[in-house]
Amino acid sequence: MAVGEVMRMEIPAGGDLTVTTPELHVLAVDDSIVDRKVIERLLRISSCKVTTVESGTRALQYLGLDGGKGASNLKDLKVNLIVTDYSMPGLSGYDLLKKIKESSAFREVPVVIMSSENILPRIQECLKEGAEEFLLKPVKLADVKRIKQLIMRNEAEECKILSHSNKRKLQEDSDTSSSSHDDTSVKDSSCSKRMKSESENLFSLL
């Protein structure tokens, strides 16, 4: 599949699932088809892989967080960022945020809330629950690029920490192995000396 080409996949109970190709995988959630298309286009321009769903409930189903009523059809699911509208019928963006942060599988995934209403208590509430950022609609390309850079920087830091941890573990294993080898050498030397001493004592008796 060429870069930028769109691959469409079906998921049960209606709604659209659109997957594009490269880099970060973003789950975009919005009950407005117009706003979904806008955020999808901005993310695609920023070279992100995009999945769109039309409600908080469908997002939970896609992530497999709906209590077993319908897990995601995609194997080895990897989501780097979730962008969701705040005001949606049924499950709001705020409720979706809380459920994501309560899950062991996706609590570390950054969640960005979008809204056309600039209500300070609402913004503070979302940030307190762990939202990465609160964007006012219409979302601009500069917003998407800034968030993408932030996510990539965070992932690079995590990779660096993991790499450092692995190197330290390898060093500790190497030191343990070296120590074990030294202990064995000392034991072998001691055993050899004891055998030599016993042999000399035997010859003296003869």
Image (tube, helix red, strand yellow):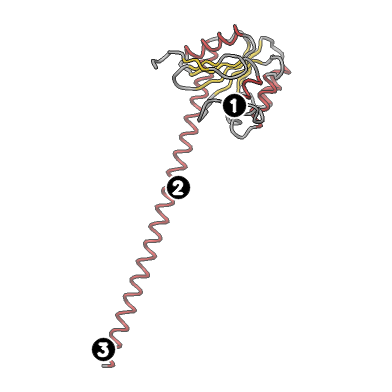
Q: Position of residue 178 (x, y in %)?
A: 38, 57
Q: Quadrant of residue 116?
A: top right
User: Which residue has dot 2 on it?
Assistant: 169
User: Which residue has dot 1 on it?
Assistant: 63
Drawn side of residue 52 relative to residue 201, left or right: right
Q: Quadrant of residue 15?
A: top right
Q: Residues within 10 Å of mark 1 (few under 14, many from 20)?
A: many
Residue type at the position of mark 2: Lys
Q: Quadrant of residue 183?
A: bottom left
Name the quarter where the C terminus is drawn: bottom left
In front of the other: 126 or 76: 76
Residue located at (32% from left, 77% from top): 193
Residue type at the position of mark 1: Leu
Q: Position of residue 126 (x, y in %)?
A: 68, 22
Residue sitting farthest toward the right: 121
Is residue 134 shown above or below 205? above
Drawn side of residue 199 relative to residue 56, left or right: left
Residue type at the position of mark 3: Phe
User: Which residue has dot 3 on it?
Assistant: 203
State the CA–CA distance, disc 2 to disc 3: 51 Å
Q: Earlier in the sequence, mark 1 or mark 2?
A: 1
Is residue 62 shown above or below 5? below
State the CA–CA distance, disc 1 to disc 3: 81 Å
